[in-house]
Amino acid sequence: MNDAHTHGHPVMHCEEVLIVLQTWIDEQLEEAVSGQVTSHIERCTHCDSEAKSYIRLKAALRRQRSVCDEVVVERLQIFGRRLCDGSLPDRHPEPPC
């Protein structure tokens, strides 16, 4: 077997895995990339430890989840849409000459 492949997947390096780790935990990666991450984590104690830490953190946050004020959520959603479409006023206009 080629050294650049493990379990039939191209080898990923820690830096690459750490970039997509949270997306992998959320099961939002394409199947091929997910397989690469899984293969890496199976043989890398550092990345395995990082993954377990994120999983524990996410579980703790879910347990602490409280109900958000619907008005606040709506205002944040409106702000986000305006931010994305560029309709927010410039907070730092050019000084007059």
Image (spheres, helix red, strand yellow):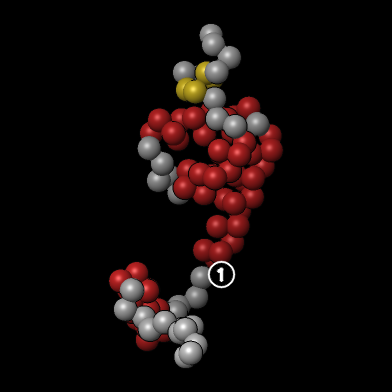
30 or 85, nearer to the observer? 85
* Residue at screen point 42% across, 44% down: 27
Looking at numbered disc 1 in the image, what kind of residue is underneath it? Gln
The image position of residue 14, as x and y in percent, is 62, 36
84 or 72, nearer to the observer? 84
- Quadrant in the picture for residue 45: top right
**What secondary structure is marked by label 1?**
helix
Residue that sits furthest to the front in the current view: 97
* Residue at screen point 33% across, 74% down: 86
The image position of residue 12, as x and y in percent, is 55, 30
* Residue at screen point 51% across, 44% down: 20
Mark 1: few/some/many CA within 10 Å (<14, 14-19, 20+):
few
- Quadrant in the picture for residue 57: bottom right
Q: Is residue 71 left or right of residue 39?
A: left
The image position of residue 41, as x and y in percent, is 59, 33
* Residue at screen point 58% across, 43% down: 18
Q: Is residue 12 above or below residue 83?
A: above
Q: Which residue is mark 1?
A: 64
The image position of residue 13, as x and y in percent, is 60, 32
Q: Is residue 59 left or right of residue 91?
A: right
Residue that sits furthest to the bottom in the current view: 96
Q: Is residue 82 left or right of residue 42?
A: left
Residue that sits furthest to the top in the current view: 1
68 or 88, nearer to the observer? 88
Residue that sits furthest to the right in the current view: 46
